Image: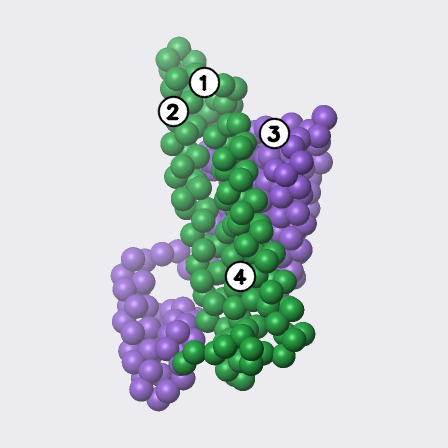
Amino acid sequence: MFPYPILTTFLVLMWLLLNGFTLGHLLLGIIVAVIASWAMASLRPEKPKLKKWYLLPKLLFIVLYDIVRSNIAVALLILRGRKQGHTTGFINLPLELEDSMALAILSIIITSTPGSAWLEYDSHDKSVLLHVLDVIDENQWIETVKERYEKLLLEIFA
Amino acid sequence: MIYTAADVPVPVAIAVAFFLLVGAALALIGAIGFLRLPTFYERLHAPTLGTSWGIGGVMLGSMIFFSVSASRPVVHEILIGLFVTVTTPITLVLLSRAALHRDRAEANGNVPEKRAVTEPEVDVEKSEG
């Protein structure tokens, strides 16, 4: 009857946010959400294994902070032009993450942080090709991503 | 219902204006960067200003303005921000993989080669081809 309870709840919430809270919309939203979750079930996606979900807000705050910081950095770089010694380049980042959900989240983090772009994930050698606008130290950059995001994601999706 | 900006108290108006300007300025800088940066892969980065805090600032401004003037929380803008954030990587990966494919095929610039797959047979084929 309810194959994806969390998805269904969020769809109902989204419906109510968009349409305003009335009894009619609550009922209609529940009907739409249940049908949508059946459609989702027929796609048979992998069930994400959330283990330490309470670390998600921590990750969210770290990411929001980093997005603000790199927004400023990239905006200044565009306005002022490049400083000496800073180059743009490709970085091959080896990953320990394998869970597809965690990889999707990491790609969203890397993409929405200006200055770094997720280009190509290779599931054979478990690495991802990134393009970074302002590389100062490649190893330090890899270290930062692994320390700040991958560690947390590994804990969340254990 | 239409709300006028004159109904909003001054501190709130300042906050709304601040967030709107921050968002709009970042989107503009992103557009300028999109125009000025020299290579395709560098240009990929510029629009992400607009899709991260560009949209974030406008979203916050809108949420504050309509929450105060309607005197109830208006938060559905979050959905716009959420969906823009979640869908950006899809477009970006599509575009960049197309560019990587083209540059590797035409041997343009210094694009890193696709690293050899672990099976040795494939390895030989790749290095010859």
Q: Viewer-nearest of labels 2 and 4?
A: 4
For label 4, the residue is B58
Q: Chain of mark 2?
A: B
Q: Cα distance, mark 2 to mark 3?
A: 20 Å
* Residue pictured at 59% horizontal, 31% vertical: A91
Q: Amino acid at mark 3?
A: Thr
Q: Cα distance, mark 1 to mark 3?
A: 16 Å
For label 1, the residue is B108
**Neighbours of disc 4 within 10 Å: few (<14), some (14-19), many (20+):** many
Q: Cα distance, mark 2 to mark 1?
A: 8 Å
The purple-tinted chain is: A
Q: Quadrant of residue B92?
A: top left
**Which quadrant holds the N terminus of chain B?**
bottom left
Q: Amino acid at mark 1?
A: Asn
Q: Chain of mark 3?
A: A
* Residue pictured at 39% horizontal, 27% vertical: B101
Is the Cβ of the residue at disc 2 closer than 8 Å to that at disc 4?
Answer: no
**Which quadrant holds the C terminus of chain B?**
top left
The green-tinted chain is: B
Tag 3, which secondary structure?
A: strand
Tag 4, which secondary structure?
A: helix
Q: Nearer the viewer, residue B5 or A88?
A: B5
Q: Say whether mark 3 and mark 1 are on the same chain.
A: no
Return the disc, 2 or 1, that comes first in the chain's sequence: 2
Q: Say whether mark 3 and mark 2 are on the same chain.
A: no
Q: Chain of mark 1?
A: B
For label 2, the residue is B102
Where's residue A1, x and y in %?
A: 30, 76
Is the Cβ of the residue at disc 2 closer than 8 Å to that at disc 1?
Answer: yes
